Amino acid sequence: MNKLAKNIKYWAKSSTLLLVLSIAASCDGFLDEDVVSQIGNDYLNTPQGLNDGINAAYSTMRAWYGTERGNNLTIFGTDIFTNGADGSWKFMNFYTNQFDSQNGHVREVWDEFYRGINTCNAVIDRSVNITGVSQDLVQQRVAEAKFIRAHHYFLLVQLFGPVDLQLSETALPTKEVTRSSVAEVYAAIIKDLQEAIPDLEAEAQSSDYGRATRPAAEHLLGRVYITKGTSEAGEASDYANAEPLLQSVIDNYGLVLLPDFGDVHAFGNEINDEVIWSVQYTRDPLTNGGGNNAHVFFLMEYDVQPGMIRDTENGRPFKRYKSTDYTLNTIFADRVNDSRYKNTYVDHFLSNNPGTFNTTFDKSKATVTFEQGDTTMWLPGYNMSEAGRAKYPYQVLTPELYTERLFPPMKKHMDPGRVDRTQFEGGRDYIAMRLADTYLLLAESQFRQGKIGLATENINTVRRRAAFPGKEAEMEISESELTFEFITEERARELIGEQTRWLDLKRWGILVERVKAHNPQGADGIQEFHNLRPIPQNQIDRAEGNASAFPQNPGY
């Protein structure tokens, strides 16, 4: 299977391509990537320019998936994660006035997404001039551009509300911008995806792995309708419109839930039968950009504990995100039938630094001695007496001993394939859409329509897969047990740490109440205006008329 070329740079605000990559199929089944510079304006009108242009647009996905900015904007300030000890960006969890229009993350997402949007606009507009390539391929590339453009506008409208809607190429810099209504933005997103779906590959995964496919566009459009349904642009038909799209993803492309939940995010298994679409990274520093950095943010400070030093296997611990008590005690309350707690969190560490040490957090014993590979720490997930902990020849980290430095680390994104223990630029592909999410979105659309039996069965499909072997029946729920609250918790159990939670809470209209109820660090600061992010100040400043033409969101 070929794999989409990675990290293609494209400057789309002027009429000149400053840097792209020349791509050719290589003998090993992947794509060679060679840096090419000084490309003229007419290059986009050629078959190779069409390919390089759309690949450049794909590269802007890396502004969001697996990045610090994408994680901070979706993980911080929610009900299921709060801050660890890492000092950077805590204000995004606290909702203080430091989170303002100068925020670097919102500026970078805004700029990169609009760069990608204008690249898509250029590909679409120039496609009519291209000769020497089949019309089917041109239509597929245009469909991919519409998928990317719709994706970017979908995230922008969720984060910022009314945004500048540009649907044709901006060949020269301009200050003429305006904030189109939420309804207008959603109409453009839906039109793009509806037009894209027929011309995309009707396969579970593209033969050129990483390109958008028909099921990816159907999944995205289904989510668009469900999100639109609770927005100011919502219509009574939104949930009914979502249902057949999501059902099609499940029925028509051979996608299946993996038998073991633990395999979905297993290192080395990023390409699997549950993945609908993923964002491509690489191990080549030339083409990897900033890399997939999600591996650093969810880890605890294991590397200064007795018997341990930092290594690639256990990761570089930034201690950024700590699961809330609500997550550990409510979301993952069932650890007998449901495998997802066990498969989401690291529960023990093995010594990579043998010797005898004074204990640090577990004072039930004065010293501990380890040989290579011995257990150094165990996180049982429940409290025990000091006498109970003293029975073990290693430190036992129980919930009463959790701190902002020591807590259950999440293992979904760990990347032991990095070249050394300090490398920040991870190389794992980021799974952006997978089938379990499709089932949950479908169940939600059916629940909203009162189709409780169908919704319950789709929820149970996900839950049976999540069961420990032999516990499938115990994992099933009855129709009477399916409530909106259950849906919110099931999405947390399944999708925790996958850049969905803030967006889910916002679209459900419960962001403020859930943070106040379950995130003590964010509870005092969050207000209703935080349902939108601040418009970047540089965008307001470069608009003709400044704030009068492009006003800031209220509260910032």
Image: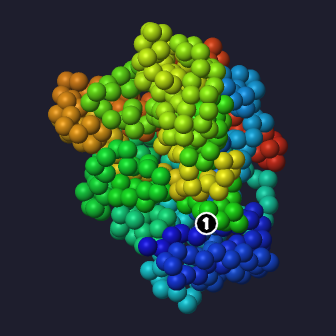
**Residue flagged by tag 1: what amino acid is it?**
Lys
Q: Is residue 123 visible?
A: yes
Q: Residue at x 56, y 46 (%)?
A: 313
Q: Residue furthest bottom?
A: 132
In the rendered image, the vertical position of residue 502 relative to residue 268, given as above or below: above
Q: Is residue 174 left or right of residue 443?
A: right
Q: Nearer the viewer, residue 177 or 376?
A: 376
Residue 377 point in image, percent of width and height: 51, 28
In the rendered image, the vertical position of residue 329 relative to residue 539, given as above or below: above
Q: Residue at x 78, y 36 (%)?
A: 102
Residue with the mark numbered 1: 6
In the rendered image, the vertical position of residue 392 relative to residue 256, given as above or below: above
Crowd rating for badge 1 (residues with CA inside 10 Å; few <14, some 14–19, many 20+): many
Residue 323 point in image, percent of width and height: 52, 26
Residue 205 point in image, percent of width and height: 40, 65
Residue 86 point in image, percent of width and height: 69, 30
Disc 1 element: loop
Q: Nearer the viewer, residue 86 or 40?
A: 86
The N terminus lies in which quarter of the figure?
Answer: bottom left
Q: Residue at x 70, y 41 (%)?
A: 105
Quadrant of residue 132 in the image?
A: bottom right
